[in-house]
Amino acid sequence: MTSHKVTWLEWAVISSVEGGGAAANTLAENNVAVISAQILIIIVFTSFLLAWAIHVISY
């Protein structure tokens, strides 16, 4: 059950990151604000996943 949740979360993050990257490249190649916002979102998602995984493992 736990590995299924992790797999689903990883898949959701990977597809949103890839989709966001494609959108940022097509719509706003030179828009630094959009790119910075996307990097920030990726960092937040990664931190959340790491904290969640550590919590599950130590539990």
Image (cartoon, helix red, strand yellow):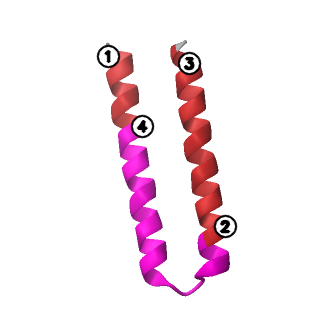
Disc 4 crowd, CA 10 A, few/some/many (<14, 14-19, 20+): some
Q: Residue at x 59, y 28 (%)?
A: 7
Q: Which residue is mark 3?
A: 3
Magenta segment, which residues?
24-49
The amino acid type, in three-letter code, at marker 4 is Leu
Magenta segment's dominant SS is: helix
Q: Which residue is mark 1?
A: 58
Q: Which mark is residue 49?
A: 4
Position in image of residue 54 (x %, y %): 35, 26
The amino acid type, in three-letter code, at marker 2 is Ala
Dot in front, 1 or 2? 2
Position in image of residue 51 (x %, y %): 33, 34
Disc 3 crowd, CA 10 A, few/some/many (<14, 14-19, 20+): few
Q: Is residue 36 magenta?
A: yes
Q: Which residue is mark 2?
A: 22
Relative to 8, 44 lies left or right: left
Whether tag 4 and tag 1 are in contact, CB under 8 A, the answer is no
Disc 1 crowd, CA 10 A, few/some/many (<14, 14-19, 20+): few
